[in-house]
Amino acid sequence: MRCLIETVRRGQIPEARDLDTDCLSLGRGADQDIRVQSRLAGLNHAVIEQEKNGDLRIRAIAPNHILFNGRKLSEAVLTPGDEFSISSVSLTVMEAPETYDLRLEIKEQTGRQNKELEDALWASINADSERSIFSMRRTAWTLSLAILLLFLLMPLAGFVYKPLGIWLRTLPVVSDLSWNSGTISAAHSFFAADCNRCHEQAFVPVRNSVCTDCHKDTPHHVAEEFRESIATLESNRCSSCHKEHNGSHSPALIRHDESLCTSCHKNIKSIAPDSKLADVSDFGDGHPEFQATIATFADDKSQPVRIPLEQKDRLQERTNIEFSHAAHLNKQGVKNADSVNVQLECADCHQPEPGGKYMAKLDFESQCHGCHKLNFDADDPKLELPHGDDRRIQTFLDGYYADRAMKDDYRLLATPPVDRERHRPGEALPPLEHLERKEWVSKYVHNVDSEVMRFRVCGKCHTVSLNQEGNEESSQESNQETSLESSQGDDTQQFWKVEPLAFSAHKFPKADFNHDRHKTQECTDCHDAEKSEHSEDVLLKGIASCRECHTGAAGAENKVASTCIDCHGFHISQNLTMDGKKIKVPPKAGTISGIESPPAGNNVSPRSAVP
Amino acid sequence: MYGSILSYGQYRYLKQAAALVLIALLLYLSSSPGEAPNGGTWQGYTLGGISAALILFLLWFGIRKRQYHCTETTLFRWVSAHVYLGISLPVVVTLHCGFQFGWNVHTLAYGLMVFVVLSGFYGLYAYLVYPEALTANRCGISRREMITTIARLDDTCLALAENLGAEAHHKVLREVVETRLGGTLWQQIIMGASLPVLPLFQWKFAGNFVASEQAGLNVKDQSAEYFLRRYLQESQNKVEIQRVVELLKVLNERQFMVSRVQRDIRYHAFMKCWLLLHVPISCALLAAVMVHVISVFFYW
C-alpha cells in the first residue's frame, strides 16, 4: 500500500512523505508511521490497512476511537473526501494520485496540550445535557397545548357541531363530559350524559324553563296567597336552591337545612309585613308553641280555629260526643256488655291506618259496639237500633212498634191496659180501633225515641238536639231543658237528632307528624289520656314533650337533630302547577270531621314536594 | 443565608399565608349547612378567585426571577412569598372544591396543582440543603479550577504512562477519555454517587468499563489502577516501580478531583431536577385552570 502523507502546520511549509507499508499506523508513539502530537492520542491509536478487495479500512485501537466524519467510530472504510480526527489532529482523505493507494492530508492544531484535555472534560459535562431530549420549554408547551386541545377545544367543537359532540361523548376524556363538575343526582342521572339537556346556551345559567319542561305538573312552589308577599321567591332561579352536580344523593338538590326556611322565617315581617306567623329560628330554642286546629263552639257553630296549646282555657274542642278517656282507661277495668270487667288500652280502640302515618278513623262497630249495645226494649233485649243514621231510628221504631201493635201487644203496653177485642181472621179493624192503635204507636215511638236519643242509647255518648223540620235552628239538649211534653202537644214535625262528630282529624295540619316513626314511644308520652275526663280535652302535650327527644339542627346530647323540613313542608301551591295550570283536585287541608281523610297540601312532605 | 428564605421579614409571608388559610377556612365554614360546599356557592366562587389569583402570583415568580433589571423588590422576598403562599394554595383550593373530586378537568387541575406544590416542597428542601453541601465540597475553589486541575493531572498521567509501555498508556488513556463528569440529568445525579447497592449500575451510567463488561470481565480488573498494581507486583525495574508509584499517586489525586467535580455537578442536578417538572407542570396547571374556569362558566 503506497501512501502519500502531506502534513500542514500553521506558519510552516507543508511537507509530504511517501510511505509504502502494509499497515499504516497512526499514534503518539515514536514507532508510528504517522505521529499524532496529541496527549489524547494512544501510543498506537489506529491502523489503516488495505483489504483484499482494495478498500482502505481504518481501525481504532485506542479507547477513544476516531471521530470519523463527525461520528465516533472504531473502524471505517476510507474514501476520498472523508475526514477523521484523532484528538486535535484532523486528517483528510484526498484523491490519491494514480500510483498511490492513499493520500492523507494532516492538519495539526497547535496550542496548549492541557487545553485539549480541558476541553474534553468540559465537553463531557455539557455534551449530553445539551442533547437531552427533555426540554422544560417544550414539555411546558406540549402539556399546556394538549390540555387546551383535549379539554377545551374539542368539547367546544362538540358544542358547536352537535353530531361531533355526541360522538365525542362516546370517547374518553375529550368531550364536554370532562367538564362535569360532580355526579348528577340519581333522579336526573338518566340524562346525565346529555349536558345540553340543561346547559342550552354557552355562558348562560340554566333556565327555569328547562326544569319546568319536565316538571310542569309539579305543584307551584309558591302558594297563591303568598305570591305577592314573597315575589322574590317566585323570581328566583330553580337552581339557586336546587343545586345539581353534588353527588347522586346530595342534600343540595332538595334542601333540608334550617336556613332554607329561617332565612325568611327568622324575621318574617321583613319579607311579609302582614304575616301573622311567629318568627322561627330553630326547633330547639326558637320555635313558638304549637297551634292546634280544633273545632270550637265559636259563634255557636262548629268551626276550625287554631289555638296555641299554651292557652289552656280556650283549648276546648266541640266534638259532639261525650267520652271520658280516664273512665275507659280505668286501671280497675270497665264492664263490658256482658258485665265482665275488662282492662282497656289505647290500642284497643286506636289503631294505625295502613302505612302507619295516621291513626285509623274510629268505627262504632269495631271499637264501641263490643261494650255499648244499642238495645232499646226490655221485651226484645237482642234487638238493637241501627247506628250511624239517626233518621232511620224513628223509622225503625215505627216499624217495630207497629208490628207489636198489630200483634195486639199494644193492649199490654198501653197505659192503662186496653181490653182485648177479638176479631175474625181476615176481618178489617173497625175504624175506631185502627185509629187507636195508630195513635198508640205514634205516642209509644215518640216516648221510646226520646228516651233512647236523650238518655239511654244515643244520648249516652252523642250530643243530641231537637230538630224541627223546616226550621234551621236546633236547640241543643245539653243547653236547654226541652221537655218531652212541650213537643208532644203540637203537630209540627219535631225529631231528635244526633249532632255529627266534629273533632279535627288532624290537629297539626301544618306539620307532618308520623305516628309510625314514633312507635317506640308510649302513647301517653304525648297524649295525656289517662287524666282526661271530657271529650273537649285536647290531648296534646305541646312542644315541650317533643323537645324531650328533638332539638334544633345543631343537635344535642341524646337528642335528635331536627330541621324545619323534618316536620314542615315548603309552601307549595294547592291550586297551581309549575306551568300555571290549575290542579284539578285540590287537596283539602285542616278539615273538621271525624271521618275526613288526612289533610294534604300544606302538609305535603318534602319528599313529595320536590319538582 | 438560605434559611432566611423562610424567616424573611420576621416570617412575614408565613403570617400572611396563615391569615389567608384562616380566611379560607372561615369562608368554607360559613357555607350553608344545606348546601354541599362546592365551587358553585358564593363562598366557592370567592375561594376560587383567591386560588386563581394565588396561582397567577406564584407563576409570576417565574417571570420575575428572570427580570434581572428589576430592583423594586428583592428576589429573596419573592421566593419567601412564593414558598409560603405556594404552601397555602392546596388548602385554599381544597376548600374551594369542597372536597369534591372526580374524573374531570377540574380534578385534573387540582392534581396538577398538588404535583406542582409537592415538587416545590422538594425544591425548598434542595435549596435549604444542597448549597451548603456545595460550598463544603468545593473547598473554596471553583469548578473551572477543579477541571483545570484534572486536565493537568491527565497530562501528567499520560506523560507518565507513555514511559510504561503501550498497554499502560492504553489503560490510562481509557481512564482519561472515558471520564464523564456530566451528561444527562440522570447521569449527573447517578455519577460519583455512593450507591453501594448498585455499583455496576452506577459504573454503567458513569460510562466506564462498558467494553469490559461486554467481554464478561470483572470491571474492576480492567481499571488502570488494577493494571498498575499488578504491574508493580511483577516489575523488577526500580525506575519503573518508581514511575508506577508516581502514576498511581497522580491517578489517585485525579480520581479524588473527579469525584469532587461529579459531586459538584450532582448537587447542582439535585437543585435543578425538580424544576424540570415544577415549571412545565406549572404551565400545564395554568392551562388546566383556564379550561376549568371557562368550562364552569360555559356550562353555568
Image (cartoon, rainbow, N blue to C red):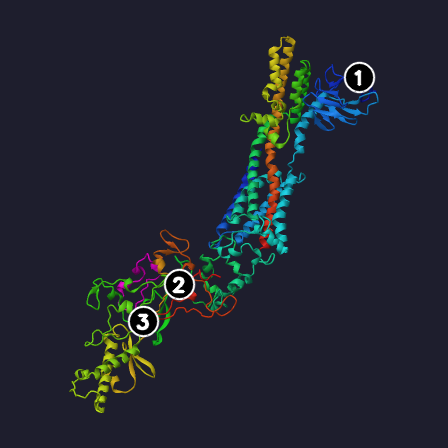
- Chain letter of disc 2 in the image: A
Point out which mark residue A511 bears.
2
Chain holding disc 1? A
Q: How many marks?
A: 3
Q: Quadrant of residue B300?
A: bottom right
Q: Quarter of the image containing the N terminus of chain A?
A: top right
Picture coordinates of residue A136 (x, y %)?
64, 38
In the shown orientation, is residue B15 left or right of residue A523?
Answer: right
For the residue labelled by badge 1, is the local secondary structure a helix, a strand or a loop? strand
Does the image show residue B136?
no
Task: Tell me if residue A22 comes above or below residue A578 in the rendering.
Answer: above
Q: CA distance from mark 2 to mark 3?
A: 22 Å
Relative to the observer, which residue lies in front, B293 or A441?
A: A441
Q: In terms of secondary structure, where does tag 3 sit?
A: loop
Q: Which image quarter: residue A495?
A: bottom left
Left or right, residue A593 beside residue A220: left
- Reading the image, the residue beneath label 3 is A319
What secondary structure is marked by label 2?
loop
Q: Residue at x 63, y 55 (%)?
A: A160
Mark 3: amino acid: Thr
- Residue at x-position 64% and y-position 30%: B183
Q: Are marks 2 and 1 on the same chain?
A: yes
Mark 3 nearby-residue class (10 Å; few <14, some 14–19, many ≥20) = many
Nearer the viewer's eye, disc 1 or disc 3?
A: 1
Label number found at residue A19: 1
Q: Which residues are magenta?
A: A519-546
Query: Could you tell me the amino acid type at mark 2?
Result: Ala
Distance from label 1 to label 3 (Cα)? 140 Å
- What amino acid is labelled 1 in the image? Leu
- Which numbered disc covers residue A369? none
Q: Is residue A540 magenta?
A: yes
Is tag 2's residue or tag 3's residue first in the polypeptide sequence?
Answer: 3
